[in-house]
Amino acid sequence: MDIPLRFTLPVLFLLAVPATAQELLTPDPIRQPESVVEIQLQSLQKNDVPVPDTGIAQTWAFAHPDNKRVTGPLERFAWMIKGPDYRNMLDHQEHIIKPVVQTDDYALFAVTIITADDQKMSFKWEVKKVKTGEFAGSWMTIAVSPPLRGGDST
C-alpha cells in the first residue's frame, strides 16, 4: 500500500519536533539544592534551545509549589522572566553560584551572571524542600530576588 507523500511529510515533521514537555528534567529528591539552581540557570542561558522558551519552561518545572501560586501560570511566569527584573538572565554568558546558607530544608545561594551584553548582575536564589505532594522531598526554587545593586548578592 502506497501512502501519498502529502500525508507522509506532515507526520515526519511532527515526529521531528521535540516534545519539549517530555524532555524537561523534573524535581527529584536525589537532586541537591545547588544542582537545581544550576539546571535553572543553564536552561535560562540557552532559553530557546531546542525551541523558544524551553529554558523558561524548564525553570518553571523547578519552581516550588508555593512560588507557582504567586508567579503562575507558566504564561504569567514567562512574562515575568521577560520583564525588566529578570530578562537579563535569558541568554546570559556565564553564571557563578555560591552557597550562602543551607539547612535540612532550605538553601540560599548568591548568584552572579554576566549578561549577553557583558553586564554583571547578582541575585539571591532560594530553594527549599517540598513537604508534600508529587515532589515531596525535592528541592525547588522558592524565590529569586530582583537584581541586587552593585552586583553583590551576599
Image: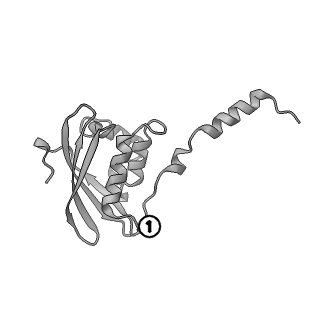
Q: Quadrant of the C terminus?
A: bottom left
Q: Residue 93 at x, y = what percent?
A: 29, 38
Q: Give the amino acid type for the residue marked by disc 1 in the picture.
A: Gly
Q: Residue at x 35, y 50 (%)?
A: 40
Residue positioned most to the right: 1
Question: Is 5 left or right of 110, judged from the image as shown?
Answer: right
Q: Which residue is depicted at the point 46% across and 65% down? A: 134
**Residue position marked by numbered label 1 in the rendering:** 133
Q: Residue furthest top?
A: 6
Residue shown at the point (52%, 48%) measured from the top left = 21
Image point (28%, 33%), residue name: 116
Image location (x, y in percent) of residue 147: 19, 43
In which quarter of the view is residue 37 placed?
A: bottom left
Above-or-below relation of 126 to 151: below
68 and 3: which one is in front? 3
For the residue labelled by badge 1, is the local secondary structure a helix, a strand or a loop?
loop
- Looking at this view, is 7 or 32 the one in front? 32
Give the quarter of the image for residue 91: top left
